[in-house]
Amino acid sequence: MRYLGSKTLLLNEISQIITSCAVEGTFCDPFGGIGTVGSCMKKQGYKVITGDILNFAHYFQIALIQLDAPMEFAAIKKKFLFKDNSEIEKYMNTLIASKGWLIEEYAMKRQFFTLENARHIQGCINCIEKWKEKNILDEQEYKVLLASLIQSFDKIANTAGTYYAYLKKYYRKALQPFCFELLQPIKGKRGCCSFLMDAAKLIEISNYDILYLDPPYNERRYGKYYHLPETIAIGENPCPMGKSGVSTPYEICSKFNKKNQASDEFEKIIRMARAKYIIFHYTDKGLISTNTVRDILSAKGHVDEFYFDSKGYHTTKKTDECQHHIFRVIV
């Protein structure tokens, strides 16, 4: 899934810095997002603990990181006589709804999806919610199906990368047919866990070998930029407003999104952190100044610094080149 702040292009560099600290142990990513870095570290053999405050991101983390094997979906297979999970995927791809809130609000009124794709997506939403109501899905199976649905429709969404705006004309990928595919868990060390939890609380509850901190850099609220995935994740029947179709005010917001609170919150979590190594991933364009970061981290331990160039957030019109700044702290 395309995600603000995703570190896909920097995974090799991040991995090298982390493995320079320790080649095994517990790795905590409390700002875990959709699990990009956590998945990479799980694959390399770390016991990974992740967190996020958004439901849909938490569902991705469960599907990719917390699970050790694909879900069984035993009740669904029994009811429909499906032999394996591929038959569930095939069934989901036959579903078409004639009407529904996603069709009306995000295809007919706002062109986030073509009408044909919206009908398929709505059919999947209706089916998953119906299965949940009839108790033929357990809680984890429900979350994995929704994360898989979000991942699948993001591939054909008519957007530049977030759901805060749609493109004026249907882009090439948006004209491709919707195809439901189940997310597959990353193979790695067992016992990984994911939490729907504020980062400060997750940092406070345990000791970690490596604490990886990748908080928001600016005032963009992820809840608004990803309102549609979050609406689907919480099972809300929305009342969209405005051109973007944001269905609720989405007050969920990290203190790192607020200029007058970000530095104090950073100092708080560093002070309470119980880890052998801290990796702080930021940008010099962020709300917390570089000098402030250095001062706070230096009080915790020995600090090394690394710089990497990468493309930042972009639209079809403009790409923002940004420089990632990674601090490694030996506590």
Image: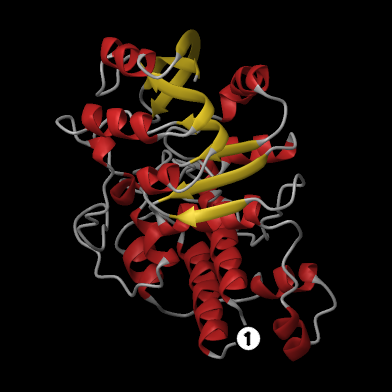
Per the image, the residue denoted by label 1 is 136
Q: Position of residue 322 (x, y in %)?
A: 40, 15
Q: Residue furthest right?
A: 83
Query: Could you tell me which secondary element the residue under label 1 belongs to?
Result: loop
Residue 69 versus residue 39 in the image, above or below: below
Residue 119 versus residue 246 in the image, above or below: below
Q: Position of residue 20 (x, y in %)?
A: 66, 16
Q: Position of residue 226 (x, y in %)?
A: 37, 50
Residue 101 versus residue 320 in the image, above or below: below
Residue 52 versus residue 302 in the image, above or below: below
Residue 158 is at least partly visible in this image? no
**Which amino acid does the dot numbered 1 rest on?**
Ile
Q: Residue furthest left?
A: 260
Residue situated in front as seen by the camera: 301 or 94: 301
Residue situated in front as seen by the camera: 72 or 99: 72
Residue situated in front as seen by the camera: 193 or 3: 193
Residue 81 lies in quadrant: bottom right
Q: Position of residue 207 (x, y in %)?
A: 52, 40
Give the residue displayed 62% in from the left and 57% down from the top: 63
Q: Quadrant of the N terminus?
A: top right
Residue 175 is at least partly visible in this image? yes
